[in-house]
DNA sequence: ATAAATTTTTAGTCTTGTCTAAATTTTTGA
DNA sequence: TCAAAAATTTAGACAAGACTAAAAATTTAT
């Protein structure tokens, strides 16, 4: 049985191996774990004795297959706990990292699989990262940060990095979320501009760097069709295509209970003086909700002879 | 912030204070934690320095109010995790202790309250022990082991101790569970005999000692009325009064889905050659279930002109 | 009341994981 | 290529927590 510290080293080495680093050096590990290089050397020797890493003095380390298996299990555990915290306990995804870091070290042969089942065998954690299977298979992340793509690219957000916090908060405030499709319209050293779900976003390249997307083919793109309910105009008719993944727990349940379920037709009914809340006509019932919540409801506009007033 | 070790000492001292022990001695703590008396002395000094216990050489220890508060929080955490493991992950209650022992040390100001909410603010853990409130209030346990009561006593099981394991397994095998009402009909050094839910149980006093009950007044007693569905005889009519608390998760859901809901009338329909499974008539439908499952369904017999065949 | 038994404490050691400071090796750059 | 810089390892120390063995205090029993 490994100690928490040993597990953390394996996890750190694994994550460095996954990044583009050539060799996993003592310094990199030390940086990753906020510790000193000398401590790392000590621990590496211990891990090498246990056959979890291959180590040659001054040459860096590499996980053995055994070490990799353990690392993958920890990653699996971490990500499943994150899903639990967000889905079941209604934490925001920026709050769960430290807690999951503790929970991932709980020792049990059955716990994670039972949790996995409770959560419905999720494939991704709340950051969009793939969850390794029980067998240790992990879906490769083949996306890159937004600034790596040229103007005109169409993509889907697959990961949002939550560190450093300042940048992450900025992204949260912009209301972007995993799964959104986007269309890059401008990309230079000064700014990155893209459209997503009926809104235009302008980000500094540093900020955009924390958002990873995969490129989509034109055919897969449905941005023109997919909007947020808050963008529905008077007189337009739409069909609900889902509730955004960023909306979970109680609020999601409430929206579903109110009748905002897939394939339901919806139009704007009444507008309050400030345009917030607005009332919508759903199944012959008028329901008023605030824009903050209407944002969560994804719709597809239906072509009508809209008399846009 | 306290270390896991410090927390475990506080918990141990707390549990000894709750028991009938006069003074909390070094040896008792050592026994409780399976460690050596000398280690205990060392740790006690540290806790005394932190003002968590009052300590005078050779005189035993006592928790300060601050120490008690921490101990209560750990107990709360432990018991809430146990409920989670049993209710949400379908563990048996004999499996959850060690896991909860790890989970109780997770550091977070919000986690336990969120879990508590998810679980519907349970008042008792799966062993029947009360869960301290957020404010640190705990319902006193005012029960005693079965052998302490005299013949004729009527009581309800409020706690089943899961250590030592051999005895616990024996109780599990007998199919006894928290909440059951019982009627003691014999109690001497050789054996304890009682009736519960239509069955007679004969236990050795050592075994019965692990079962804690509270005495009930005659008026509160409903044993004569409450049976398990597996005890229903051909021709008798009954009303479902609930599904036993020991049946949780999937099986419980399945039984409810099949129509075994409270207040439903039920009779035996057909019997297979081995009497297992048996078919029951519920809401004009015949449903066959095995006795292992019928045991979970609690019924109340309805007086009829039963032609017991 | 006092010797024996038991409990508790002290002193010293060990392991894990960390650190600093110094020594050694590798890499970099003119 | 070779000196300076950077990276890595070694040596020695320290804190937490536990252990053994022995000393000291308390309790028990005759």
Image: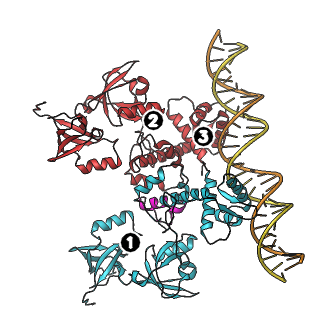
Chain colours: A red, B cyan, C orange, D yellow
Q: Please check whether the numbered discs 2 and 1 fall on a single chain.
A: no
Q: Residues within 10 Å of mark 2 (few under 14, many from 20)?
A: some
Q: Position of residue B1 (x, y in %)?
A: 60, 48
In the rendered image, the quadrant that contains the C terminus of chain B is bottom left
Above or below, comparing residue B189 to residue D14 in the picture: below
Label 3 close to label 2 by CB (< 8 Å) = no
Q: Is residue B82 magenta?
A: yes
Q: Which residues are magenta?
A: B81-99
Residue located 59% across and 43% down the image: A52
Residue under the point 42% across and 27% down: A207
Out of B106 and A181, give the one closest to the viewer.
Answer: B106
Residue that badge 2 annotates = A162
Q: Chain of mark 3?
A: A
Number of numbered tags placed on the structure image: 3
> Residue A85 location in percent, x, y?
43, 48
Residue beneath the point at 67% across and 71% down: B22
Determine which quarter of the picture holds residue B63.
bottom right
* Cα–Cα span, label 3 and label 1: 51 Å
Chain label for disc 1: B
Residue at numbered disc 3? A53
Q: Secondary structure at mark 2?
A: loop
Q: Which of A189 and B155 lies nearest the eye of the viewer?
A: B155
Q: Which residue is the site of mark 1?
A: B244
**Inter-mark Cα distance, 3 to 2:** 29 Å
Question: What crowding class fits label 1: few (fewer than 14 Cα within 10 Å), some (14-19), or many (20 or more)?
Answer: some
Q: As drawn, which residue projects farthest toward the front?
A: A273
Q: Secondary structure at mark 1?
A: loop
């Amino acid at each position: 049985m490994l100690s928490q510290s040993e597990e953390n080293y394996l996890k750190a080495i694994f994550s460095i191996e996954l990044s583009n680093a050539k060799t996993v050096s003592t310094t990199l590990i030390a940086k990753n774990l906020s510790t000193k290089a000398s401590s790392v050397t000590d621990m590496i020797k211990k891990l090498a004795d246990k056959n979890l890493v291959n180590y040659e003095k001054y040459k860096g380390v590499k996980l053995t297959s055994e070490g990799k298996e353990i690392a993958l299990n920890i990653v699996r555990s971490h990500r499943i706990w994150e899903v639990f915290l967000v889905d079941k306990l209604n934490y925001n995804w920026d709050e769960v990292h430290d807690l999951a870091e503790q929970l991932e070290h709980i020792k049990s042969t059955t716990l994670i699989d039972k949790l996995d089942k409770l959560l419905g065998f999720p494939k991704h954690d709340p950051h969009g990262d793939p969850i390794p299977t029980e067998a240790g298979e992990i879906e490769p992340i083949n996306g890159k940060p937004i600034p790596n793509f040229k103007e005109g690219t169409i993509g889907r957000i697959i990961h949002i990095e939550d560190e450093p916090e300042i940048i992450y908060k900025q992204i949260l405030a912009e209301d972007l979320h995993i799964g959104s499709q986007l269309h890059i319209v401008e990309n230079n050293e000064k700014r990155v501009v893209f459209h997503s779900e009926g809104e235009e976003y302008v980000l500094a390249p540093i900020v955009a760097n924390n958002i990873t997307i995969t490129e989509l083919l034109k055919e897969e793109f449905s941005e023109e069709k997919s909007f947020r309910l808050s963008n529905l105009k008077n007189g337009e008719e739409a069909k609900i295509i889902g509730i955004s993944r960023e909306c979970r727990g109680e609020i999601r349940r409430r929206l579903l209970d109110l009748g905002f379920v897939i394939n339901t037709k919806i139009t704007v009914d009444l507008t309050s003086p400030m345009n917030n809340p607005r009332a919508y006509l759903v199944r012959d019932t008028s329901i008023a909700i605030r824009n903050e919540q209407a944002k969560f409801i994804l719709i597809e506009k239906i072509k009508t002879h809209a008399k846009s007033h």
